């Protein structure tokens, strides 16, 4: 959730909704921001000059949104089957089964240690994939930036909930680690998409002409994302 920049006057502070709420100060934040964390908790970002009292009131005023998002989170996690040998995991655009090999697991050409007894297999496998993504994606971005003649100041590999990537006006490219789970052509298109914002910080016709010049097959990648993207992000 991305609240409006102008915050209304603080309401009386009421008891917070029944959820673990974390208050985090961020010196570069321009407004109070409310988000659900990966473990179902709530994080309130406090901007420079803000205070926790107002942040608590802010969270209380959005209690209905919090409960709606937490309900979706609980439903998603309560119905999700645990991962085990044979579980299909998206990798390079294909649902690929996890294979147990002695004390290791294999996912296509990746081999890594099996999680400890009783550990969450999904969290373990996703942490391995994210580790590989942090090493694979930045060099691809730099190579593409050099090829297209655009400057990049910083590259981040993150765990966005619903976005594949972003580009800041200062030249920071942020990519979702799940790009490693996509077909290579789709992964490369998303890198092109963010780099094209170094020419046009919008989605105007001029922007899409840049994308077309750099990746003529971008429409096929978009079709794949519309068909499978939500499943990969789930």
Image: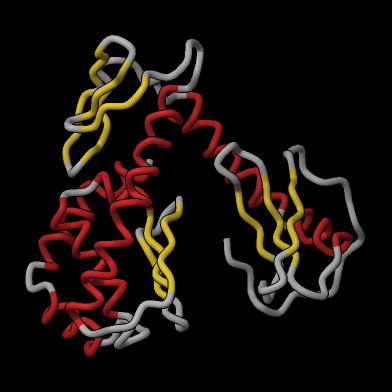
From the viewer's perspective, is residue 73 above or below residue 102?
below
- Give the residue drawn at x 13%, y 77%: 214
Closer to the camera, 116 or 164?
116
Closer to the camera, 117 or 49?
117
Q: Locate the C terminus by quadrant.
A: top left
Q: Quadrant of residue 81?
A: top left
Closer to the camera, 199 or 5?
199
Where residue 67 appears, as percent x and y from the top left, is 65, 43
- Give the residue drawn at x 37%, y 18%: 114
Where residue 76 appears, as percent x and y from the top left, is 47, 33
175 sits to left or right of 37? left
Closer to the camera, 171 or 83?
171
Q: Locate the N terminus by quadrant.
A: bottom right
- Give the residue drawn at x 70%, y 61%: 45
**Which color mode does the image show?**
secondary structure
Where residue 105 appears, as percent x and y from the top left, is 29, 20
The residue lying furthest to the left in this view is 216
- Give the residue drawn at x 39%, y 43%: 131
Where residue 16 appears, as percent x and y from the top left, is 82, 46
């Amino acid at each position: 959730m991305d609240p409006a920049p102008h915050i209304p006057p603080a309401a009386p502070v009421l008891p917070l909704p029944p959820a673990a709420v974390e208050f985090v100060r961020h010196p570069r934040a321009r407004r109070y921001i409310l988000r659900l964390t990966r473990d179902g908790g709530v994080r309130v970002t406090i901007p420079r000059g803000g205070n926790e009292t107002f942040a608590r009131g802010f969270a209380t005023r959005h209690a209905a949104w919090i409960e709606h998002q937490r309900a979706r989170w609980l439903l998603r996690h309560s119905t999700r089957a645990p991962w085990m040998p044979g579980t299909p995991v998206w990798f390079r655009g294909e649902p690929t089964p996890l294979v147990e090999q002695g004390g290791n697991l294999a996912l296509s050409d990746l081999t890594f240690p099996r999680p400890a007894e009783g550990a969450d297999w999904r969290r373990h496998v996703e942490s391995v994939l994210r580790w590989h993504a942090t090493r694979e994606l930045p060099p691809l971005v730099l190579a593409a930036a050099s090829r297209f003649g655009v400057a990049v100041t910083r590259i981040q590999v993150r765990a966005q909930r619903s976005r594949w990537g972003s580009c800041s006006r200062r030249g920071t490219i942020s990519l979702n680690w799940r790009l490693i789970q996509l077909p290579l052509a789709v992964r490369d298109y998303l890198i092109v998409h963010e780099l094209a914002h170094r020419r046009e910080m919008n989605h105007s016709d001029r922007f899409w002409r840049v994308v077309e010049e750099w990746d003529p097959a971008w429409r096929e990648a978009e079709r794949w994302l519309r068909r499978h993207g939500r499943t990969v992000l789930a």
